[in-house]
Image: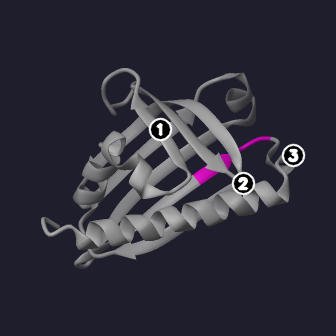
Amino acid sequence: MIVRNSIEIRTSPEKVGEWLTNLDKHYKEWHPDHVRWVKVTGGVDVGDVVYIEEYIAGRLVKARSKVTKIEKIDKKFMMELSPLGFLAWITGQKGLFSAEAKGNTCIYTSVLSVQRFGWLIPKSFVEAMKKHAKEESETLKKMLEADKNN
């Protein structure tokens, strides 16, 4: 099961990366269903751990995730998170945020994948995740395009 959402934003991949690596400052304003984003180990670098709380389909989802990859290469930013815990490990969950330059803009993409047993997730929950991801993308676009330092 894969939930993927992309949107074009009038900003640079570097600005998207800077914003995402400082989510503790923006998390609640990013989406009304966001509750907490805590840098457990102090940063957002490979190996660091973050704690997230958000509502999906009216259910409070709590997750500790490890930053497994960060790439800042030539007009591209990518951050991958792997939720910690037995169920996340069994199902092969991963989250990915990326931004890639496209002229004077960039394409921001978020991906949530459940590599094994995704078919067990109720369709209503998957649809709620898709809606949530789309709303996050739209809000990120509004926030970054309104930023005068863009």
Asked if residue 114 is among those painted magenta in the image, a careful observer would answer yes
Compared with 135, 120 (above or below) is above
Label 1 CA crowd tier, 10 Å (few <14, some 14–19, many 20+): some
Quarter of the rendering occupied by the C terminus: bottom left
Q: Is residue 114 left or right of residue 18?
A: right
| Callout 2 crowding tier (Cα within 10 Å): few <14, some 14–19, many ≥20 | some
Point out the stretch of residues depicted in magenta: 112-116
- 92 in the magenta segment: no
Whether pointer 3 and pointer 2 mark residues with C-beta atoms closer than 8 Å, the reply is no
Nearest to viewer (mark 3 / mark 2): 2
Q: Position of residue 50 (x, y in %)?
A: 45, 30
Comes first in the chain, label 1 or label 2: 1
Query: Would you say 91 lies left or right of 64 here?
Result: right
Q: Residue at x 43, y 49 (%)?
A: 28
Q: Quadrant of residue 75?
A: bottom left
Residue holding disc 2: 57
Q: Is residue 55 left or right of residue 122?
A: left
Q: CA distance from mark 3 to mark 2?
A: 16 Å
Circle 2 sits in a helix, a strand or a loop, which is it? loop
Of tags 1 and 3, the one toward the viewer is 1
The amino acid type of the residue labelled 3 equals: Leu
Residue type highlighted by circle 1? Arg
Measure the alpha-carbon separation of dots 1 and 3: 27 Å
Residue at image coords 34%, 49%: 26
Query: Quick one: SS at disc 1?
Result: strand
